Image (tube, grey):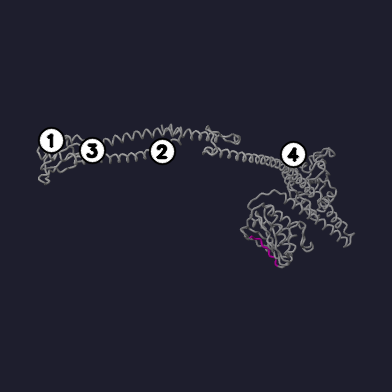
Amino acid sequence: MHNKVILLVEDNPDDETLTLRALSKSKILNEIVVARDGAEALDYLFGTGIHAGRDVTVQPQLILLDLKLPKIDGLEVLKRLRADPRTALLPVTILTTSNEERDVITSYKLGVNSYVRKPVDSDAFIEGVRQLGLYWLVLNTPPAACR
Amino acid sequence: MRKWLDKFSPLGWRLVSATVAFSTVVALLATAFQLFLDYRRDLGIIESTLDQVGQSYLPTIGNALWATNRKELQVALDGLARLPDVRHVAVIEDGAISAQAGQPKASNVRSRNYSLTHLHRGETMTIGSLSVVMDMDGLYRRLLDKFWVILITNGVKTFLVAGFMLGLFHLLVTRHLRRIADFAARQGAGTLHERLALERPKHAPHQLDEFDLLLDGFTRMQTNLATAVEILEQDIVKLERAEAEIQELNSALEQRVADRTAQLEAVNRELEAFSYSVSHDLRTPLRSIDGFSQALAEDYGEHLDAVGHDYLNRVRRAAQRMGLLIDDLLRLARVTRAEMRHTKVDLSALTAEVTDDLCRHKGYDGRSLTVQPGLVGHGDPTLLRIVLENLLDNAWKYSSKIMQPKIELGSVTQDGRVVYFVRDNGAGFDMTYVNKLFGAFQRLHRDEDFAGTGVGLATVKRIVHRHGGEVWAEGCPGAGAVFYFTLNEPLRPVAA
């Protein structure tokens, strides 16, 4: 189970660092792949662009998706991966700064599995990431195709 | 005839028929009086005839009777009977008719008896009586003839006079009246300069009649009307001009409203974009500040002394406080823009939910709260929930430092309106600063005493105002505070 990948889509290097730190402090040992914009995330998922030739039968166990991203934003990434049968069933958690109601609603309409707002208080953030990892990587049972 | 007359001249017909009726009555009365006079005169003639008989015939008849001269008697009686209107004469001796002339008749007669006397040796002797019967038929016939003559002549005269009057009336009055009526009916704003003329000779100023007066009055009326019409036309021009101006103003106003609406929409869009940006971009650096401060404290804590850790803690507190400020600010903005739906809200049930949340997240003791059961309000449930959250959170927060906090949510009826209140026995506030209470970022307590951003009550006020209600507070330092609010109806703040 631990060899499964977590895809973190995050453009802000500070946030990336803090998220990776939170994951490691939570003892989550999965490999973390970081995509720094929406296009890179889609390239990784579909084995295109800089990730051409990647074995796309192996998909991440969890995608942590930011909303505000350069090139292709998080909602668009969500829409496209839900539209593709290879990635349609992947667990996706929005991990973002805003909790604008319209973002929450659009995300759920597009089939997100979870929406988490990053709090300013980093203690709360670390605790949140810990719970996310525990839930999505341990407690939750994904469809067989995603295992 | 009457119909034709009615059509021709109803007024003439009415005048003539009244005149005819009146003159008929007068004529009948005059005739009756005249006939009565004639009757009296004829009756006098008959009486004088009878008197004449007494004077001139009685001696002759008396002598003839005394001499028993039958022949002479009969001649005298025949002569008497030939007098006008004498119907029957008879000499009566010892109760029986001894001689007579003419035809006897019982009715419609006038009779007189004379005593027949004879002077014999100086002594007047009654030798019989003479009865003379006068026939009244002649008199009556004459009267009847006269009656008919008078009636017919009167009738003919009346008819002729009536016809004459009708014609004259038409000539003098009716045709002019009709002309005046036609002229008046044709009168309009455009014909006021036309003058009414009647087909009749001009009269000298001292001979003016009613029609002249009428024409004069009519002309003056036309002049006055023309003046009035002119004034009205001027008024109408003014009104039209005013209306055109109003229309112009209206369209300008509509344009302005449309412009302002567009501006407002643009501002709203900008505000929305701004809030979105604030909620994303302003918080991101704060998370970096807090996150790396924490990482520094945790990962490199051994290189820092107590002061260093204190500084890092201050950095983190400031960052977190700014995070809260941003959140509250965004919520205030959202509350202002949020679409409202009005519905009946069970405030008691809503309070139970809010209490659950607050107790779970902030560690308040729910037992210190008393809620009036069956509390109902009308408004937007989401917004009313925010009101309750803020008021109850405040109540718990400011009574957190006393031994036995008591918080009460209820309603009272004031001037026929429902006033909701949240009362606590906590820190209270100084009424001098009550005006600052509901302003954004205005606080009456120091953050060290009671933490807060100063946005909660501003949010409450904005929500209550959006419901058309009022919110006010009463308090006393150390003796607690009461927050009142109404929904739907505006209400003057109650001065403490």
Residue beneath disc 4 = A83
Say the numbered circle drawn on residue B19.
2
Alpha carbon separation for disc pair 4 and 3: 144 Å
- Same chain for labels 4 and 3? Say yes or no: no
The N terminus of chain B appears in which quarter of the rendering?
Answer: top left
Alpha carbon separation for disc pair 3 and 2: 37 Å
Q: Which residues are magenta?
A: B404-411
Mark 2 belongs to chain:
B
Q: Could you classify mark 4 by the number of other residues whose Cα lies within 10 Å: few (under 14), some (14-19), or many (20 or more)? A: few
Q: Is residue B278 left or right of residue B345?
A: right
Q: Could you classify mark 2 by the number of other residues whose Cα lies within 10 Å: few (under 14), some (14-19), or many (20 or more)? A: some
Q: Quadrant of residue B43?
A: top left
- Disc number lying in front (2 or 4): 2
- Same chain for labels 3 and 1? Say yes or no: yes
Q: Is disc 4 placed on a helix, strand or loop? A: helix
Camera sees residue A147? no
Q: Are marks 1 and 4 in contact (CB under 8 Å)?
A: no
Q: Could you classify mark 3 by the number of other residues whose Cα lies within 10 Å: few (under 14), some (14-19), or many (20 or more)? A: some
Q: Is residue B199 left or right of residue B227?
A: left
Q: Residue A100's spot in the image, x, y percent?
A: 75, 48
- Same chain for labels 1 and 4? Say yes or no: no
Task: Based on the picture, tell me whether residue B288 belongs to the magenta stretch.
Answer: no
Q: Earlier in the sequence, mark 1 or mark 2?
A: 2
Task: Based on the picture, tell me whether residue B409 belongs to the magenta stretch.
Answer: yes
Q: Earlier in the sequence, mark 3 or mark 2?
A: 2
- Disc number lying in front (3 or 1): 1
Q: Quadrant of residue B360?
A: bottom right
Alpha carbon separation for disc pair 1 and 2: 64 Å
Q: Is disc 3 placed on a helix, strand or loop? A: loop
